[in-house]
């Protein structure tokens, strides 16, 4: 009889542990895919705008491509370490650590979305300033257009990443957490199957 009690006592813990490992494995896979997407965008921009910067005859296009190259060096600098971090096998988190990592990831993408609005706004501001600054008109227009393009991409990327992670959590860990309730008959928890 004691063996049955032990089996039934530890079975829910085993199921929860397996679910947490799968949740964290999937979360890292999502991050790897997102960083691959960001790295691909950055790489294509570096190549395309590198060629555009070298071959453009118009000054505003030259500045547009110049800013794209600089911007995407930063994107690539974020994507590569982000990819390798997601490849680490840190799957065996506790429930608390898993929730903390999930919320941190969601907050980062939401915060970045706010920054993306600032980048886009800065781009429009630079383009507006170009109207009154004839000496730097082409540079302000080129840089402004680049900020609008890159900020818009990052806004779509960051909102999509937030929604993908939020959806993943809602379908898995949040769904499991709804099954756990405080016991009504003394100390303990009730796990529904």
Image: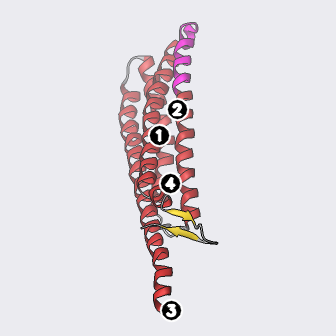
Rounded to the nearest whole Å, what is the CA distance between mark 4 and mark 1?
A: 17 Å
- Select label 3 or label 4 by which is in front: 3
Specify start and end residues of the magenta stretch as a single range.
120-136
Secondary structure under the numbered disc 4 in the rendered image: helix
The answer to whether the residue labelled 3 contacts the one labelled 4, judged by CB atoms less than 8 Å apart, is no
Q: Position of residue 66 (x, y in %)?
A: 47, 29
Rounded to the nearest whole Å, what is the CA distance between mark 3 and mark 4?
A: 50 Å
Is 132 included in the stretch rendered in magenta?
A: yes
Density class for disc 3 (Cα within 10 Å; few <14, some 14-19, many ≥20) is few
Q: Which mark is residue 2?
A: 3
Q: Earlier in the sequence, mark 2 or mark 1?
A: 2
Secondary structure under the numbered disc 2 in the rendered image: helix
Q: Quadrant of residue 25?
A: bottom left
Secondary structure under the numbered disc 1 in the rendered image: helix
The residue positioned 47% from the left and 66% from the top of the image is 20
Report the front residue among 142 and 81. Answer: 81
Q: Earlier in the sequence, mark 2 or mark 4?
A: 4
Q: Which mark is residue 81?
A: 4
Rounded to the nearest whole Å, what is the CA distance between mark 2 and mark 4?
A: 21 Å
Report the front residue among 181 and 23. Answer: 181
Density class for disc 4 (Cα within 10 Å; few <14, some 14-19, many ≥20) is few
Q: Earlier in the sequence, mark 1 or mark 3?
A: 3
Q: Which residue is mark 1?
A: 158
């Amino acid at each position: 009889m004691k063996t049955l009690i032990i089996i039934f006592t530890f079975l829910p813990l085993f199921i929860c542990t397996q679910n947490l490992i799968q949740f964290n494995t999937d979360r890292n896979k999502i991050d790897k895919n997102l960083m691959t997407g960001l790295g691909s965008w950055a790489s294509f921009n570096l190549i395309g705008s590198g060629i555009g910067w070298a071959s453009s005859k118009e000054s505003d296009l030259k500045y547009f491509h110049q800013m794209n190259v600089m911007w995407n060096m930063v994107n690539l600098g974020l994507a590569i370490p982000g990819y390798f971090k997601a490849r680490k096998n840190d799957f065996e988190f506790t429930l608390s650590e898993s929730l903390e990592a999930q919320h941190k990831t969601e907050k980062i993408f939401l915060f970045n979305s706010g920054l993306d609005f600032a980048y886009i706004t800065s781009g429009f501001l630079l383009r507006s300033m170009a109207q009154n600054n004839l000496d730097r008109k082409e540079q302000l227009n080129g840089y402004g257009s680049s900020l609008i393009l890159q900020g818009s991409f990052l806004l779509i990327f960051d909102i999509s990443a937030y929604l993908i992670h939020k959806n993943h959590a809602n379908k898995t860990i949040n769904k499991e957490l709804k099954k756990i309730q405080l016991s009504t008959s003394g100390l303990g928890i009730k796990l529904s199957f």
